[in-house]
Image (spheres, rainbow, N blue to C red):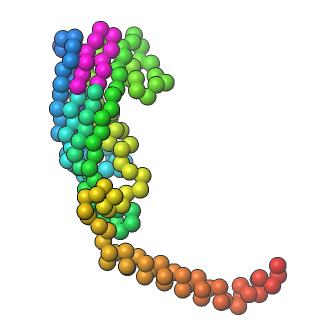
Amino acid sequence: MRAKILLQLKPLKQFSIPFTGLKIGKHQFEFEIDNSFFEAFEYSLVKKGSLNATVGLDKQETMLILQIHVKGTVKLECDKCLAEFNSPLDIKERQIVKFAEDELESDDLEIIVLNKKESAIDISEIIYEFINVSVPFIKICGQDGDGQECDQEMIARLESLSHGADKKEELTSDDPRWAALKKLK
């Protein structure tokens, strides 16, 4: 079990930014996000993707300001025809990291509070959340204008199966036992 946990954390190790050795001012970091990134998160909505993340870190005396830009494509499953399709993502977000004596919970979602003794920040979960939040609630082929249309053969098959279910409902409604029960009303 321990080996499995270590294997899961290894792809995310590159997303740790050591900020203690950095001078006060602006710094830039670049990260590549691939399928191994999403495999590290067990219940991820996204399983495959190819994205690039650019993180601008503005180090100040009492805080860090992260400007995060994630751009690329993720593979999603169409809710209509169940086919996989590429969905483009372009995310620009800001995250503030403040330092405190104790790790306190912040009410503001834009602020993370770190202990002053910390020397690095792991941004993998931050990027993961931004990607998953930006996935459309209803995922349909071609909604992003990429030209890919739904699989018509699969839609026809699903429609024929749904019409078969309607016929079964009609057959069960003709059952004489139901007619006898309806008379009791």
Answer whether residue 64 is visible to the viewer in this image: yes
For the point 27% across and 31% down, the residue is 68
Quadrant location, the N terminus: top left
Residue sitting nearer the eye, 45 or 13? 45
Residue 155 in the image: above or below residue 142: below
Quadrant location, the C terminus: bottom right
x, y (%) of residue 44?
A: 34, 47
Secondary structure mostly seen in magenta is strand
Residue 143 in the image: above or below residue 73: below
Quadrant in which residue 169 is drawn:
bottom right
**Residue placed farthest to the right in the image?**
184
Whether 60 is among the magenta residues is yes
Residue sitting nearer the eye, 120 or 84? 84
Residue 95 in the image: above or below residue 39: above
Residue sitting nearer the eye, 100 or 117? 100
x, y (%) of residue 67?
A: 28, 27
Residue 16 in the image: above or below residue 133: above
For the point 43% across and 28% down, the residue is 109
x, y (%) of residue 184?
A: 82, 82
| Magenta stretch in the rendered image | 56-66
Quadrant in which residue 151 is drawn:
bottom left
Answer whether residue 8 is visible to the viewer in this image: no
x, y (%) of residue 179?
A: 74, 87
